[in-house]
Amino acid sequence: MQLNPTGNPTDLTPPAACDKPLRLMLAAAASALLAPVHAQAQDAPPGLRVPWQVDSAVLLYSEADGRVRAVEPVVAVRRTDAGDRTLSLKLTLDSLTGASPSGAVPQPTAQTFTTPSGRATYETPPGQIPLDPTFKDTRIALNAGWEQPWRTDSRLLVGGHLSGEHDFVSASANAALSHDYNQKNTTASLGLSLEFDTIKPEGGVPLGLTPMFGQLQKAASEKRNVIDVLAGVTQVMSRTWLMQVNYSLGRSSGYHTDPYKLLSVVDGTTGLVTGDQYIAESRPDTRTRQSIFWQNKLHLERGDVVDLAYRYYSDDWGIKAHTLDARYRWQWNERYHLEPHLRAYRQGAADFYRTFLVEGVDYDSTAGRAGIGFASADSRLAGFSAMTVGLKFGMALPGKREFSVRLESYRQKLNQPANVPGALQGLDLTPDLKAVTLTAGYSFDF
């Protein structure tokens, strides 16, 4: 299932499109434990066996109020031979369960909804935000990469990705070229990524901005293509200071709508659902994204490292976002280290984001026609601020092994809608989201 039931994946580093799934947010947390921690074997004598480097992690994610829970084991292996050629592979399995917001607003009375498959119904109690309790998904993903020297002072990297779920399949290929200048103190890089997605939602693809339940479907499946270009420069500023600046530009075309999200149609005076009540959301079929990422790593005495980063993101859907990320790796002694982490994020809403639609203004139930071109109540497209606070503990073990555990707390606060009518004024239309992530990692050679 491709929807993200909670936060906005633009709240990530590196940036990602807002219509990407929750699992990308989880993978971003897990990847912090999957970075290579061993020295490369590029100078190994001929004939000497070069070991595989293995980085593994298990991530547990849980949202408050009985929302989404996730379990995600990840295993990554890499091997660098005597010719400085590196093969890397990563396998990811994840399972998501729990209750996912549908996009409908609370009401003073109970509401009954049909599940995406159309085979069951569920009821939301009065005053509570509607959550689909049948949310469940499992995914398997494989990444592969090959890196090698290419001519003098250059490196070539090629890779691919394949993932599958019961209603979503994605395949991508990427390539990047980097070149060293200034006695290897400056590295310039340029990368290209192509992605091809197939979306086949339960119950078919709904026709946007038409009644969600009992309607004819637009199609059984849809497709989306994505192209991303990344240009960057890494500069050694001093013996203890490393700086990196990246610019990314991406464009996607095809189906961007979340087929499981809906909007409530309410009376402009009473605030009660009326007319067709619930309609399917609709988003533009193209999206252009760009971002600038600036990172600084400072190496202090005793092996401590300060990592500071800032990212600015914008797209032609009207979203603009700022991310500040800070980490401090405190080398307690030769064996143990601690790493506190703080990330602050803020974004503005998409131009077509609506908490609800007003009957006779945004939507005409009599004619069955919307008065606007696009609309979505997905909180990933809302204006909101978020804060992540975490702490990692790492322990070096004999034989080039390392164990680490990271605990993080995430809180998201959505902007409140203006001009709320009638009964909606006394209800929490945009409740805060709280989540906890626990990640344990283990690295070794074999």
Image: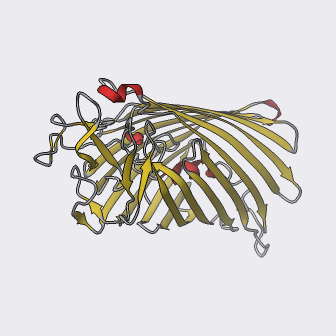
Residue at image location 40% in from the left, 63% down from the top: 120
Residue at the extreme front of the image, as rendered: 109
Tell me if 410 is positioned left or right of 224 in this view.
Answer: right
- Observer-nearest of 8 and 104: 104
- Observer-nearest of 157 and 324: 324
Tell me if 327 is positioned left or right of 300 in this view.
Answer: left
Q: Is residue 288 visible?
A: yes
Task: Give the quarter of the figure containing the C terminus.
Answer: bottom right
Residue at image location 69% in from the left, 47% down from the top: 438
Task: Give the quarter of the figure containing the N terminus.
Answer: bottom left
Q: Where residue 398 appears, x then y in whole percent?
A: 89, 56
Colour setting: secondary structure
The quarter of the picture where residue 92 lies is bottom right
Q: Where residue 225 appears, x then y in whole percent?
A: 33, 60
- Observer-nearest of 182 and 32: 32
Residue at the extreme left of the image, as rendered: 367
Above or below, comparing residue 91 to residue 65 in the picture:
below
Q: Is residue 346 visible?
A: no
